[in-house]
Amino acid sequence: MIRSNNGYFGEFGGRFVPEILLPALTELEELFFELRDDPAFWQEYLTLTQEFSGRPTPLTPLRRLSEQLGGAQIWLKREDLNHSGAHKINNVLGQGLLVQRMGKKRVIAETGAGQHGLATAIMSAKLGLDATIYMGADDIERQYSNVFWMRQLGANVVGVETGSRTLKEALDEALRDWAASVETTHYVLGTACGPAPFPELVSYFQSVISQEIKQQSMTQIGKLPDEVVACVGGGSNAMGAFSAFLDDSEVKLVGIEAGGLSLEDGQHSVRLLKGTGEPGIAQGYKTLFLQNDDGQLGETHSIAAGLDYVGVSPILAHLSQTGRVTPDSSSDTEVTDAFQLLMKTEGIIPAMESAHALAGGFKRAKTMNKNQHMVINLSGRGDKDIFNIARAFPQRDWTEFLQREAERSTDQINAHLATELAG
Amino acid sequence: MFPKQNDALQVMSHAVIGFPNLAENEKAIDGLVAAGVNLIELQVPFSDPVADGHTLANACYDALKQGGSVQATLDLAEKVCANHPDVNFILMSYLNPLYRYGLQALFDKAAAVGIKGLIIPDWPVEEVEPWLPTFDDLDLSPIMMVTPNTPAKRVERIVNASRGMVYVVSRMGVTGHETEWGEAFEAYLKNIRVYTDLPLAVGFGVRSSDDLNAITGKAEVAAFCSKYIEWQRHDGSDIAAEKMKTMIGEMKH
């Protein structure tokens, strides 16, 4: 596992927050440092993920697709098969154990695609905690099915209307809530970003992914994979997929960012490639941010709400600077192509976020030989994207169904209101 | 000059550079000075102001659309510092815009145009300490923040790094909401005075004459910022300055 140097990874990381948040971060760090080397704590965490989230998740060979592409043998790490449908639950269950130890009764979280919010709502229901989830108003529109489930699970979902109304603003708003509530509330940060100790702490819990990949590769392939590929939004699934391989220099680690529409300002969420992100200090930490010359954080775009973020894990910023992680990007159209290809060739529906890793991975796999093996981290499943996918591949029968469903739903609400009035 | 311990309460107020627009900033500052304000924060607008409530955050978003920036702040500072040599202008900014400008260059420039102090809410004391010799050379005062949940040992460290005055965050949360000024608040101030002779500037939740009167005799400075920006937004800078003048006139001494 990677260890920070007093919260820093090379020049990145640190803890740049208003003074009011310092005591809570220190408390969390002390608890985390006390527990992380305790094998009993790790076992407690593993047992929880096994009992509740179906771990270990499988390593699935893509036989038909690999044959069709004619390059490396491709394997998928099936984080989509987690309870809640994405890797986000790993981190949340781990932080749930910390919340119980701290004795806090309320949690808050920011969410982009809604997977982290959903995972937090699930954990809160399970542990009997109050949950408030901050989500950009635009992301709410993009991922309404997750909002629906968060509310059904009892979480309070707050739409954030400021700025570009996506993940960046949701994080700002969660920090504002925390400044007022820090003594009784834990902030369940969802990715390997933010002030220390979060990047390290989130990577620690997510590292269960690469520990399993390692074991499964030895059993199923008979050796370590040649490449591990993951999409990079904030960076938690990538850190999860890479962590256990950092010292295995023969394993190439590739992070795929959201290339969006183009590499013009505001049309993508690429931060690790040259000429995109620049060193900056905001949202509690130092990393490569998309920003202008005045240090104002920039606008981002991605077809995948979960990758639509202006900063990136300080650990990945560091590892891409040292060359250990190779950054690459996939455009929106490459992503929808890869999405369809996986679905139709292998019968697996990927999340739009994860389809970035597929697009980047497939492109690389073609240039590799048949004796080589690539593991792609399928960080989440695509059910949540049904409305986006339907928009990307328009079909009249779906639109007509939505119209009928809207009418039925309206009739039902009206009837319900009429009964209430009569009563 | 910054006030001294036990001086009568002074009001510190605020400008967000670019809000409502760059031309009006200078006029608004003239109005504040005429109203009797001798301490004025010049806030560099930022895209992600996490310590600010919605009043100042929205002023930041609007200011950015009007061309507010580090450079615009320094340009304005140069004018207002020259026009009002008896007023202490304090540069308030989140760290990133200053970091992008270049910290050393920024501090040199700020001192050169006549800025007296710095308030940087997301720059913790550990990161500030290595810069103290630079600040002392430039006669630029880092005004550090203490909060109600800061442990005593850390209060000591923060006030030791502070120059000019100590910014006392009155309560938990962000700017722009009300505060209770009870015995707990007095005890909180007393605990800070154990470690420092610097004057205390109380901020967060100073929104009315009643608040000012409650702080009178307990601290030397009251930061009256979000409410003033609300006045500016709703009534314009002229009426905001009149209201400020009336309020300062009503202060107990």
Image (tube, rainbow, N blue to C red):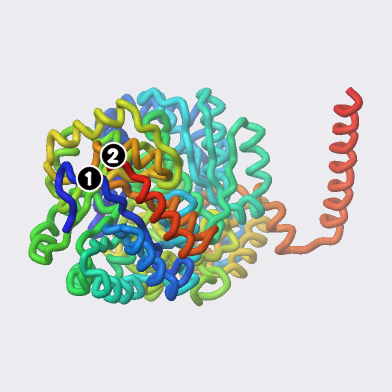
x and y percent of residue A174 in the render?
46, 44
Circle on res. A290? none
Mark 2–mark 1 contact, CB under 8 Å? yes
Residue at mark 2 to residue at mark 1: CA–CA distance: 7 Å
Q: Nearer the viewer, residue B140 or A332?
A: B140
Q: Please name the amino acid that badge 2 sits on.
A: Thr
In the rendering, which numbered label is found on residue B8?
Answer: 1
The subunit carrying tag 1 is B
Kindly state the secondary structure of the residue where label 2 is placed.
loop
Closer to the camera, B233 or A306? B233
Position of A136 with respect to B99 (left or right) is right
Residue at 36 percent across and 66 percent down: it is B29
The reply to whether label 2 and label 1 mark residues of one chain is: yes
Q: At which x and y percent is residue B114? A: 20, 70
In the image, what residue type sits under mark 1? Ala
Tell me which chain the residue with mark 2 is part of: B
Classify residue B124 as left or right of residue A304: left
User: How far from the left and from the top, in percent, is residue B195?
Assistant: 12, 37
- Name the image quarter holding the N terminus of chain A: top left
Mark 2, residue position = B216
Q: Please name the residue shown 53% across and 23% down the image.
A: A128
- On screen, residue B119 above or below B188: below
Q: Residues within 10 Å of mark 2 (few under 14, many from 20)?
A: some
Question: In this rendering, would B106 be left or right of A52?
Answer: left
Look at the picture and state if B26 lies above or below A413: below
Name the residue rendered at 40%, 29% in the picture.
A184
**On the rendered image, what quadrant is the C terminus of chain A found in?**
top right
Q: Is residue A54 visible?
A: yes
Residue B77 falls in image quadrant: bottom left
Q: Secondary structure at mark 1?
A: loop
> Which residue is at 60% across, 48% downward?
A381
The image shows residue B216 at horizontal and vertical percentages of: 28, 39
